Amino acid sequence: MSEAATPTAESPVTYRTLEALEELAELVDTARGVPMSASCVLPRGSVLDLIDDIRDALPAELVDAQDVLDQREELLAAATEQLTEVTHAARAERERIVGSAEIQAGEMVRSARDRAEQVLTGAEDRAERLLAQAHAQEERILAHARAEAETMVAAARQEASRLIQQSEVYQAAASQAEQVRAEAGEQARQMIAEAEEYVDGRLVSLGDLLTRTLRQVDKGRQALRERSPRLTESTDGRRLR
């Protein structure tokens, strides 16, 4: 081959070959990757154009070689087949991930609802027990106060009767008996009032406790209602993609 027929490093043919190779390498570097694979998706038209440019820049005897053309067709067929397989695999994986997310979201919602029901049931049971305890304690305190009052009144009556019987001056005995009876009645009323005040205070404390407990239950149920739509929206968004 003569010196004129051989392309040099400065010839347009060699420059175009290097330029096309650089463009092809850039296409591969910037190509979108296939999930869960080392493969990538290339624009077929652009790749073929660059290959044609390289082929046109090569000497005519290399372009006309049949084995190079056959190899090109085989590579394109293999790339097309691999692209199809990767696409099918990606779609199958997407469906599997979406299905798994839907199942997991459903389980989380059911678990949250069960937990909320358990908390609500426990709060109601506790409130009933506290009310029963408060009523029982109230009855015991009132019964004790009544018994003390009756005992004091009976003692006052006995004392008044004794004073009347032992006193030489009936009027003095009657006055003293009335005073004792009045003091006993006042003490009895004071004890009953103190007992009722104590019971009322306990009931107020119990009411505050029940209010806080029911408020916590309402917050838990509200959190559950706010969480369920977010799970449903997240699952729907993945299904749409």
Image (cartoon, rainbow, N blue to C red):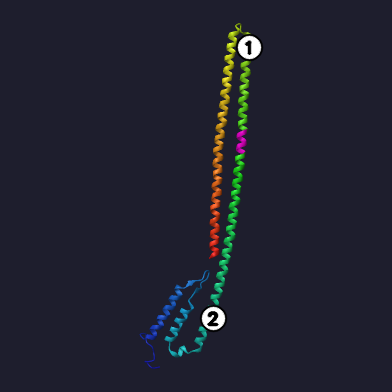
Q: Secondary structure at mark 1?
A: helix
| Outermost residue, left side | 10
Numbered label attached to residue 185: none
Q: Position of residue 221 (x, y in %)?
A: 56, 49
Q: Residue at x 56, y 33 (%)?
A: 202
Going by the numbered disc 1, the residue's amino acid type is: Arg
Residue occupying the point 61% across, 28% down = 142
Could you tell me what secondary structure mostly forms the magenta stretch? helix
Q: Which residue is found at the position 60% from the left and 41% from the top?
A: 126
Observer-nearest residue: 185 or 15? 185
Q: Are marks 2 and 1 in contact (CB under 8 Å)?
A: no
Tell me, for residue 77, which label it has, or none: 2
Residue 224 location, x and y as percent?
Answer: 55, 51
Point out the residue furthest to the top here: 168
Q: Which mark is residue 162?
A: 1
Magenta segment, which residues?
129-135
Q: Position of residue 195 (x, y in %)?
A: 57, 27
Q: Secondary structure at mark 2?
A: helix
Circle 1 packing at 10 Å, graded few (<14), some (14-19), many (20+), is few
As for residue 133 lying within the magenta part, the answer is yes
Q: CA distance from mark 2 to mark 1?
A: 127 Å
| Magenta span includes 194 | no
Quarter occupied by residue 209: top right
